Amino acid sequence: MEREGNDCVVGDTPFDGEASILSSTLLLELVGEVTLTFHSDGLSWKLVESLDNDVSACLGFRSFSKVDTEIKLSDIYAVELNDHDLLPISNFPHATEHLLLAEDLKMYHFTVHGFIRSKNQPSQWILAEYTFGHKNLQTCQMWVDKLIASLKNEVGRPRNLLVFVHPRSGKGKGCRTWEVVAPIFSRAKVETKVIVTERAGQAFDVMSSITNKELNSYDGVVAVGGDGFFNEILNGFLSPRLKAPYPPAPSDFVPMVKDNGDSLVLDENGIIEKTSSQNEDQFPLISSPTQPGSRLSNLNSEDKAAEFPVPNERFRFGIIPAGSTDAIVICTTGARDPITSALHIVLGKRVHLDIAQVVRWKKTPGSEVEPNVRYAASFSGYGFYGDVITESEKYRWMGPKRYDYAGTMVFLKHRSYEAEIAYLDVESNETNLTSKRDRRGNLLRALRSSHVSERHICRINCKVCNEKPNHASVGVCSLTPHLYSEERRWARSKGRFLSVGAAVISCRNEKAPDGLVADAHLSDGFLHLIMIRDCSHPSYLWHLTQLTRRGGNPLNFKFVEHHKTPAFTFTSSGNESVWNVDGEIFQAHQLSAQVFRGLVCMFASGPEV
Ligand SMILES: Nc1ncnc2c1ncn2[C@@H]1O[C@H](COP(=O)(O)OP(=O)(O)OP(=O)(O)O)[C@@H](O)[C@H]1O
């Protein structure tokens, strides 16, 4: 291959703009003269050997070139030509004259923006820029045109996003966080309509009232904030648009539901009684915008014509973390890092996320039966978790530390609550040993033993999440594949609980490095129901301590029940706590819940660990 000041060759023929391989001699900033080659899936460069080896060695670019010698197209998010500010030669060690403008020893240049993976922090991505220079503007322009044309073929990258910024999120850093990442979006030529919220509930209102036509003009929505803020956006999106049946429930749950299906009854001691009935259980009501109790759609008739199907493969959600916990972003990107999240978004990454539908039927024991729907992406919890969120609201001024303070106060009070929980026990390949051993009447022992050895951690390209359900199901049924399992029964737990919780995902966060359930998956269609029966103060402390340890075993206790289930119901009796749905208070005496498998798509690819 020829090497000249202006050399751009495809094999041995001049580059014609369509060719798949392109090669030039250019100067790479801070490195020196390189042969840059474009090939099918990226760029690679090789240092052109200096005649004076000592010079190259002392400039240190030899070791640098060993580290960074290529970048994949899929890791490039922008290419920029700089045709007015010529770069001075001092930026280009080892520059030979034939690459430079003779008069002022400056050159035209273009920058390739991408990322590299952090060596110290798993899943964290770090911005990387490679600036290539040449005395000939045409050469630079040709490279830029070629790269931009190739990036256009990268599928799934967003062009237009709606961005909500919560200015008071976390320690009040929402706006600052957006300022840090906004240049990544502008470099990538992603248009953004930014709404900085002025009050709680504003993002919900915008998302629930935005016309389908306008929503369709965006490729997705980005939340700059915490889990609670994302939850608000998610609820605003789903409430008027998702048409799905309410969760199934056993017959004695609410008056309008008939008992159907076999029933397993688990008493306080974990002994299972089997009750049976002939029919299948049914879905009480179909949620639609016209039903009483469901949130009314603001969509006008013209807009109803503009379809916005849910689930929607194209439309995705992104989170730029700025909150106090940020569990959803940690579980979906593997890092709590605004830059990593922004890169996942502009590069058009995609991962499906299960969403729990939580339906409150009665707010208090004396309330009328009236369904009220909430959606949760991470966790819904009652008792300890509800009390902590209630207590922490009093200390919002403390910022993220309020959770530690409120947690300690609630722990010291050690309140427990009477409740009855029924959950669908599903025979499935995907469930752990728990359910199978249940039927041998050995539930608690099975629960205790199954967690350590069977951890299958959810990662990028997770097999469990990508597994297709055994049976063909279409439409909304495809979202709840485990409800249609042939062997399913209602099992029950009744008694005094310190907490009852349902994790949709592992809920990993900085305080609980493995999360509440280390082996929960982003989109396997299961909830992890965790019930902590009343126990001694030290035992509970030991359980909580296990949560804070990497490799800990918080579920391996006699007083902890853990079930993988697609649906459950809950009824309290006696003193009541509240539910904590993704960090938001939800008062409910009686509720039912189910999970929709992979209901929404996120701009993320799962943890890289
Ligand atoms: N401008 C605003 N002023 C006050 N509250 C707001 C505003 N915008 C949104 N909110 C509400 O603030 C609540 C908490 O927001 P967010 O989740 O971002 O922060 P956090 O609670 O600090 O973090 P995390 O949920 O990760 O623990 C959300 O319920 C959201 O509805």
Image (tube, grey):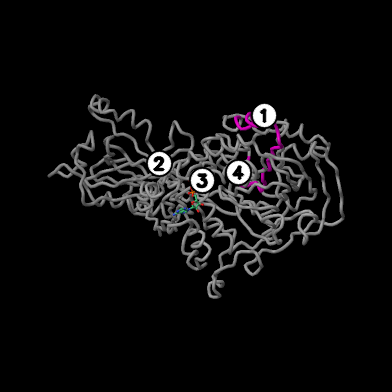
Chain part drawn in magenta: 520-545
Q: Which mark is residue 505?
A: none
Question: What is the spatial separation of the Cα atoms under label 4 and label 3, in whole angstroms?
Answer: 11 Å
Question: What is the spatial separation of the Cα atoms under label 2 and label 4, in whole angstroms?
Answer: 42 Å
Question: Which badge, 2 or 4, is on the more N-terminal residue?
Answer: 2
Between 415 and 557, the one lying in front of the other is: 415
Quadrant in the picture for residue 49: top left
Name which residue lies at 83% across and 36% down: 441
Q: Is residue 523 magenta?
A: yes
Question: Which badge, 2 or 1, is on the more N-terminal residue?
Answer: 2
Q: Is residue 60 above or below residue 584?
A: above
Given contact means CB atoms under 8 Å apart, are the residues at marks 4 and 1 in contact? Answer: no
Q: Which mark is residue 539?
A: 1
Query: Could you tell me which secondary element the residue under label 4 belongs to?
Result: helix
| Badge 1: residue crowd in 10 Å (few <14, some 14–19, many ≥20) | some
| Badge 2: residue crowd in 10 Å (few <14, some 14–19, many ≥20) | many
Q: Position of residue 217 (x, y in %)?
A: 46, 64
Query: Could you tell me which secondary element the residue under label 1 belongs to?
Result: helix
Name the residue tied to disc 3. Answer: 394
Q: Is residue 549 magenta?
A: no
Name the residue tied to disc 4. Answer: 387
Question: What is the spatial separation of the Cα atoms under label 4 and label 1, in whole angstroms?
Answer: 19 Å
Give the residue type at disc 4: Asp
Q: Position of residue 343 (x, y in %)?
A: 43, 46
